[in-house]
Image (spheres, rainbow, N blue to C red):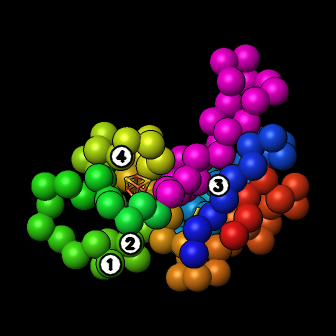
Amino acid sequence: MKIKVNSKKCTGCHLCELVCSLFHLGVMNTEKSAIRILKDDLDTSINQPRICLQCKEMKCLEGEDVVEEMEKREFVWSRDRIERCPFKALGGLGQDAYHCDLCSGKPQCVKVCTSEAIHI
Ligand code: SF4
Ligand code: SF4
């Protein structure tokens, strides 16, 4: 399963970020979300949802002795992986990075995106 993004449809409401942090951590904090909505410099018209691409070759894990399939199921990752992701797909706060685990097959962010900017 992959989540596809159509940034032209994104209204920048941030509901996806809130539901992601709520579902995984029980808090509503846009900075503790695996999906992030990037804004343009003027914080106005352009909204770019950023989310893990679920790569077959996970550059984010390079140099680590871990099992990829296990890591894919984890939501909280180490911050080191943010720098290794060539797509800048991971959000982070403090020492943690937040990785899209696809909500164990039921993506919560997709459910709440009424503009269909993100879909499966
Ligand atoms: S974090 Fe980046 S490199 Fe790793 S699987 Fe996601 S998009 Fe790919
Ligand atoms: S699918 Fe789940 S983990 Fe991934 S960004 Fe959406 S809410 Fe967060």
Question: Which residue matches tag 2?
Answer: 72
x and y percentages locating residue 77 in the rendered image: 33, 60
Question: Which residue matches tag 4?
Answer: 85
Q: Amino acid at mark 2?
A: Lys
Give the crowd class for mark 3: few <14, some 14-19, many >=20 residues within 10 Å: many
Proximity of marks 1 and 2: CB atoms separated by less than 8 Å: yes
Rendered-image quadrant of the C terminus: bottom right
Image point (31%, 40%), residue name: 83
Question: Which residue matches tag 3?
Answer: 17
Q: Secondary structure at mark 3?
A: helix
Q: CA distance from mark 3 to mark 2?
A: 19 Å
Q: Which residues are magenta?
A: 31-53
Give the crowd class for mark 2: few <14, some 14-19, many >=20 residues within 10 Å: some
x and y percentages locating residue 42 in the rendered image: 73, 17
Question: Which residue matches tag 1?
Answer: 69
Does the magenta run of residues contain 52? Answer: yes
Rendered-image quadrant of the N terminus: bottom right
Q: CA distance from mark 1 to mark 2?
A: 5 Å
x and y percentages locating residue 40 in the rendered image: 68, 24
Upstream in sequence: badge 4 or badge 3: 3
For residue 43, above or below residue 98: above
Q: Amino acid at mark 4?
A: Cys
Q: Amino acid at mark 3?
A: Glu
Upstream in sequence: badge 2 or badge 4: 2
In the image, is the residue at mark 2 within 8 Å of ligand 1 by its beta carbon?
yes
